[in-house]
Image (cartoon, coloured by chain):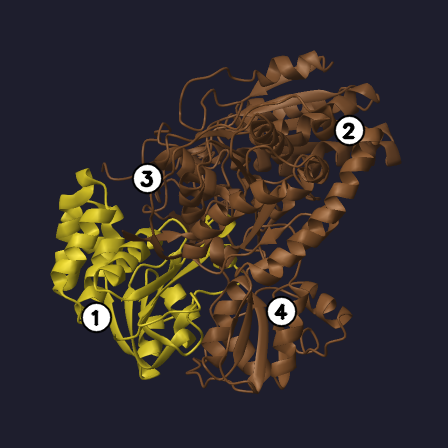
Chain colours: A brown, B yellow
């Protein structure tokens, strides 16, 4: 049976058809739907949201050691978090097949950098596969499990946004009978101390040679002969752009296994074609290798290191063709993403802006608070960084600096890697104020449960981390819980905690407005007979409050009725819409 | 197999994803190769969003390039303007008259352009403009804007109407089916 599905959904299906029984992940665009789909559609697979990618990979490694086939999924920057277990799992190898999914984000649709995760395959000495459509997403997971078990290695599959988030047709097959492999205690393989690891390193180097043979012969890398004037070596989505651009007027070496690269196949292909292009997004990973084989190729000298490619880009850069367009002589103003109407973070930013504090930010919906009109964040580096960065600022500039600086991060981000920063802050005698924006869900990636919500990935009730108790347990004496929509009360709490010369944690508690359980009363409107056009409500930066001549009006289609604007209105000029 | 490149553009939260899924499913039903490219994550939070649906004998790239779209379905006027150059010569635009001010306009850093639809028409583009929000409300649910617009699009594709209805049935939760059928018919009649 044929269906149309996302690359990520196809990976989930692949996990099912490969006989995988354990899946662990931390959500991150563009990888999230892999584990979401497993949880939703494949009940035979145990699935979990782990607190972070490192733990997720450790869970998958444990499952593999115990004899199960397992999968672990993350976005590119998540692989940095999971890199520690990844490198050593390369040495231990596996028992049940182990697949590590990593989704890169060229063009940074929803990411803080444009890392090319292919470098990890080489650095950790692990095979890497790269599918080019949803069918391959599914097939390559099955193939990866085979490779994993045949060569005693974890296998990385790399997706990019356009593979993960494009739908194309997929043919299903049945799930095989699943049998756990026997669990045998084997310290020489599974205990990586120097004595054992030295022997395993020998094994790893031998394995890479065998994998290179496999790369040359397995069919994952394949030649499609067409016109031999142009040869194209390409992978993933770039393969699709190349086919769209050159059609039958070129020959292709389609790379499905991007590490180790197929040296013999590359040489054979290069010999037959006149001009050889390497078409790969981001870094010259193939190009550098091919050049090291002494083969002349054209790659980054014509094609950019930055962002995504497209068929139009290839046509322009490689064929000198540009399509004629009907240009209108009016410019469309940009539409950057914004905090939603009803977002609880709007209250927090309103107060922080009023107090004119410096804000060490983090990764989540609230990062959008950095944009106008809020302009409410000074720094954002990586998951959990806000606390360490605020602490570092204090150590550089002294305690007074900490009196006007806060670290902000979400509930899920705090559990991911903020907690270690908080321990550092307490242990090393910092005095910073940390605000945990607890909106009862992992927001930006589209509402995933996490250890602070009290529910598992399959919405089963579970133990809930008590953030206040946790903060107290690591030594924070001053822990406050406050509602960011209680603007007066929240401001008072922040002021008090900033003044205190010791670490403070403020838990800003109010659920995400998009949660089904959140019921606001519905659209509000301005009563023009009372409105003095002072613009206080407008300055909240809510997308539902727009200018109307000298005054303002509320877009009733967007407004959810959170009534934060009522709270800043001194003239009682905002009322429920619809009842005259 | 007729090649058909469709773009759905709008503002994050307007329901463009559901529309693209219904269209993609239609492509599969008529035996086309189909690719749909979606946007998730940050830009979904009130940002400009675009989804591509491509059908044909064999579809390679999931992206529609500038000057290639047969039809653009615009959920919002400013987004119609932004993506207009992706339309091929002789292509059609279905535009929802709804306006949503983007933040630069809200804070006075930019101006929402006047008479967007007229200007697009003046460029020689075939435009069908409608107030899909009003129609959706009349059908019983303001969230059905996407299916109203889908109805208009469906009537321009030459693909059998029943295939569309089936695809809606397979994609939309059952409790919303009636209102969505109604919304689709209202759009189809335009």
Q: Residue at x 64, y 45 (%)?
A: A77
Total numbered labels placed on residues in the image: 4
What residue does disc 4 label? A265
Rendered position, A196 above or below A328? above
Q: Residue at x 32, y 39 (%)?
A: A523
Mark pair 2, 3: CA separation: 39 Å
Badge 1: chain ID: B
Residue B157 image label: 1
Badge 4: chain ID: A
- Label 2 in the same subunit as label 3: yes
Q: Count residues near mark 3 (Cα–Cα under 10 Å), then give few for <14, some for 14-19, many for 20+.
A: many
Going from the N terminus, do you reach mark 4 or mark 2 first? Answer: 4
Q: Count residues near mark 1 (Cα–Cα under 10 Å), then give few for <14, some for 14-19, many for 20+.
A: few
- Helix, strand or loop for disc 4: helix
In front here: A116 or A297?
A297
Q: Is residue A194 left or right of residue A84?
A: right
What residue does disc 3 label? A523
In front here: A194 or A132?
A194
Residue A403 image label: 2
Mark pair 1, 3: CA separation: 37 Å
Labels 2 and 3 touching (C-beta < 8 A)? no
Q: Is residue A214 left or right of residue A427?
A: left
């Amino acid at each position: 049976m044929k269906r149309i599905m996302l690359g990520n959904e196809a990976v989930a299906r692949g996990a099912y058809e490969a006989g995988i029984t354990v899946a662990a992940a931390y959500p991150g665009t563009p990888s999230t739907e892999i584990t979401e789909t497993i949880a939703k559609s494949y009940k035979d697979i145990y699935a979990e949201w782990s607190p972070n990618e490192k733990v997720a990979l450790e869970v998958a490694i444990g499952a593999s050691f115990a004899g199960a086939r397992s999968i672990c999924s993350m976005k590119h920057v998540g692989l940095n978090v999971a890199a520690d277990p990844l490198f050593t799992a390369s040495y231990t190898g596996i028992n049940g097949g182990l697949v590590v999914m990593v989704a890169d984000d060229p063009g940074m649709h929803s990411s803080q950098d444009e890392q090319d995760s292919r470098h990890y395959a080489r650095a950790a000495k692990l095979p890497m596969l790269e599918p080019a459509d949803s069918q391959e997403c599914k097939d390559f997971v099955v193939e990866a499990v085979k490779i994993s078990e045949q060569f005693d290695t974890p296998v990385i599959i790399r997706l990019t946004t356009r593979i993960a988030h494009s739908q194309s047709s997929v043919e299903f097959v049945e799930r095989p009978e699943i049998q756990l492999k026997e669990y045998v205690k084997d310290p020489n393989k599974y205990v990586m101390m120097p004595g054992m690891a030295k022997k395993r390193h020998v094994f790893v180097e031998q394995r890479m040679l065998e994998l290179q043979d496999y790369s040359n012969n397995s069919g994952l890398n394949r030649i499609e002969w067409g016109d031999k004037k142009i040869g194209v070596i390409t992978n993933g989505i770039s393969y699709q752009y190349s086919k769209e651009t050159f059609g039958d007027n070129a020959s292709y070496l389609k790379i499905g296994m991007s590490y180790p690269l197929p040296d013999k196949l590359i040489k054979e292909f290069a010999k037959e074609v006149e001009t050889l292009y390497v078409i790969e997004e981001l870094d010259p990973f193939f190009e550098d290798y091919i050049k090291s084989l002494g083969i002349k190729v054209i790659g980054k000298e014509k094609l950019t290191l930055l962002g995504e490619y497209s068929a139009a880009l290839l046509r322009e850069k490689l064929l000198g063709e540009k399509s004629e367009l009907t240009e209108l002589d009016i410019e469309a103003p940009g539409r950057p993403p914004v905090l939603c109407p009803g977002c609880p973070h709007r209250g927090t930013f309103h107060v922080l802006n009023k107090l004119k504090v410096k804000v060490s930010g983090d990764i989540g919906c609230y990062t959008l608070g950095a944009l106008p009109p809020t302009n409410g964040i000074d720094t954002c580096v990586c998951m959990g960084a806000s606390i360490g960065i605020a602490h570092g600022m204090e150590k550089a500039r002294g305690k007074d600096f900490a009196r006007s600086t806060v670290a902000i991060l979400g509930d899920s981000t705090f559990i991911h890697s903020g907690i270690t920063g908080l321990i550092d802050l307490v242990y090393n005698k910092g005095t910073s104020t940390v605000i945990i924006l607890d909106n009862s869900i992992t927001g930006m990636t589209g509402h995933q449960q996490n250890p602070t919500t009290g529910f598992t990935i399959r919405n089963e009730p579970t133990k809930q981390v008590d953030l206040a108790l946790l903060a107290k347990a690591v030594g924070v004496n001053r822990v406050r819980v406050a509602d960011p929509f209680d603007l007066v009360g929240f401001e008072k709490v922040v002021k008090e905690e900033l003044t205190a010369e010791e670490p403070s944690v403020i838990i800003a508690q109010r659920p995400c407005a998009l949660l089904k359980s959140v019921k606001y009363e519905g659209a509000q409107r301005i009563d023009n007979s009372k409105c003095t056009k002072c613009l206080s409500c407008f300055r909240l930066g809510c997308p539902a409050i727009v200018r109307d001549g000298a005054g303002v009006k509320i877009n009733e289609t967007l407004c959810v009725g959170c009534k934060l604007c009522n709270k800043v209105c001194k003239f009682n000029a905002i009322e429920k819409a619809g009842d005259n | 197999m007729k090649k058909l490149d469709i773009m759905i553009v709008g503002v994050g939260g307007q329901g463009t994803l559901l529309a693209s899924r219904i269209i993609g499913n239609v492509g599969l039903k008529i035996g086309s190769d189909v690719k749909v490219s979606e946007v998730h994550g940050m830009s979904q939070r009130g940002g400009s969003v675009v989804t591509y649906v491509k059908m044909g004998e064999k579809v390679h790239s999931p992206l529609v390039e500038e000057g290639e779209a047969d039809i653009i379905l615009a959920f919002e006027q400013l987004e119609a303007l932004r993506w207009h150059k992706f339309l091929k010569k002789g292509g059609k635009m279905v535009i929802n008259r709804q306006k949503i001010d983007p933040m630069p306009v809200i804070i006075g850093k930019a101006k929402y352009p006047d008479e967007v639809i007229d200007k697009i028409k003046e460029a020689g583009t075939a435009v069908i403009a409608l107030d899909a929000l009003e129609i959706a409300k009349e059908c019983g649910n303001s969230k059905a804007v996407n299916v109203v617009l889908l109805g208009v699009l469906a009537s321009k594709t030459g693909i059998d109407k029943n295939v569309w209805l089936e695809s809606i049935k397979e994609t939309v939760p059952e409790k919303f089916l009636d209102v969505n059928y109604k919304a689709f018919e209202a759009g189809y009649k335009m």
